[in-house]
Image (spheres, grey):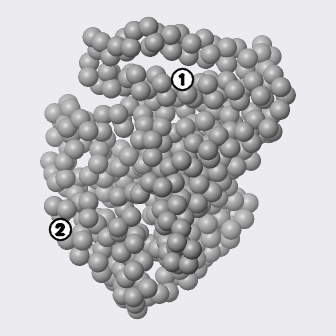
Amino acid sequence: MHKQNINHLVMIVAGVALLVAGVSLFLQPGLWSVHFPVWIKKAVSEKLILDVLVIGAIALAIWFLAYKAGKKRAALIALLVVAALLRVPHFTEVGKDETAYISAVVDFLDGKNPYLRTIDSFENVDDTGGHGYAYFPGFLYINIFFFSIQLLTGMPLQILQKIPTLLADLGIGILLIKELRKKNYTALICALLFWYLNPYFLYKRNYVYFDPIPIFIMMLSLYYLKKDDVISGAFYGLAILFKTFPVILLPIFLMKSKKWYRFLAAGSIVGLVSSIPFLNDVKSYLTGAVLVHSNRVVQGRPFLFFISYFYKVELFQIIPLRVYSTLATFAGWVAAPIVGIAKFAESKYALSIIPFALFYLFTPVLNRTYLMWSMPVVALGLFEQFHGKNKALYYIGLAAFWFFYYWYISIWKDGFHIWKP
């Protein structure tokens, strides 16, 4: 069957399914949550149906513009504009980490080491919501800049903070476009919808997270991997300055770099230069930015604790948390090279899925935004792995990840959350 006919068939089937779902929901609102176990009621909720209808409506509009009107470039621009417009109304929202960011900025401008406050805050294990600034100084430098702008202009800080987040969000979409536009347009549209209408944004209806910034920089590093070791390494070092999760991908960068030592040198220089203000107390710097996380208790909704709680399997109670933290970080360092050498997966994006999957499996700390970290990697990795004879697996994989993420958020408050094992 002609590829364009397949695209039309997919959109028609999707449209009919959405129409049936919408009519059913309208005629019998309780239809989706009757006579099912609790976890199914949460997974197939009216909110989920409505969010899927929103995605379907946007997808059909983009499909019509791209295929019926023949405006593929305009369709991509329209999708980016819609993504931005959905986020702008949330610019005035304030996240729970705002106090930690502001305290770090004030301490730094007063000549104090903000990481000393961080270390003190983590010593109280009963207070998991009052932690200080516990990252390398990427976010600190951005907030210092916007704090200064606020003092000069009076513009609310939370609005200024959203600007780089939105730009990074759009930047991720542009990278997806660069990687997929000439390979498969339908796959590209699905990847963009997968990212911009991600479960966290749709379900929580807020925009108080900064995760798109390190995700975008990490994706830039992956984009330049195998093209320019210095640029890739510099972006990798910069990504870690914001959040340390890209560390789990290090073996993939070393495997795929033309000259791995150039990659490491570039990343190290970026990290060293950015750390200059804190090198007079390296111990406090590294403890506050990294080591405090090794002492964290079970927090959020770790997958293994979910299994332990609901299926009465003793996991965290038997094996120390430090073992799980170590496996979360380093299991991918072993598994990804093995998979690459065995040629089960060879592309940089497909291999990158493995460390993320193992991180999610073993980490004792899993917050709502963590699954967002891997979404662009998953979109590109699944495409690279299945774009040949098994194209359907790409779309199935995206849908499975999206629905799992949505479901996991929907049961977030269902009783298996603890602070300490």
Q: Is residue 155 visible?
A: yes
Q: Kindly identify the residue that appears in the image at 39 percent across and 57 percent down.
A: 95
Q: Which residue is mark 2?
A: 124
Q: Above or below — where is 107 with respect to 237?
A: below
Residue in front for this viewpoint, 97 or 308: 97
381 sits to left or right of 309: right
As drawn, the residue found furthest toward the right would be 70
Q: Kindly identify the residue that appears in the image at 74 percent across and 47 percent down.
A: 178
- Amino acid under label 2? Asn
Where does the image place residue 146, in percent across and percent down from the top left? Answer: 53, 72
Where does the image place residue 265, in percent across and percent down from the top left? Answer: 60, 76
Residue in front for this viewpoint, 52 or 258: 52
Question: Which disc, if any, is residue 53?
Answer: 1
Q: Above or below — where is 39 with respect to 279?
A: above
Q: Is residue 355 visible?
A: no
Dot 2: element? loop
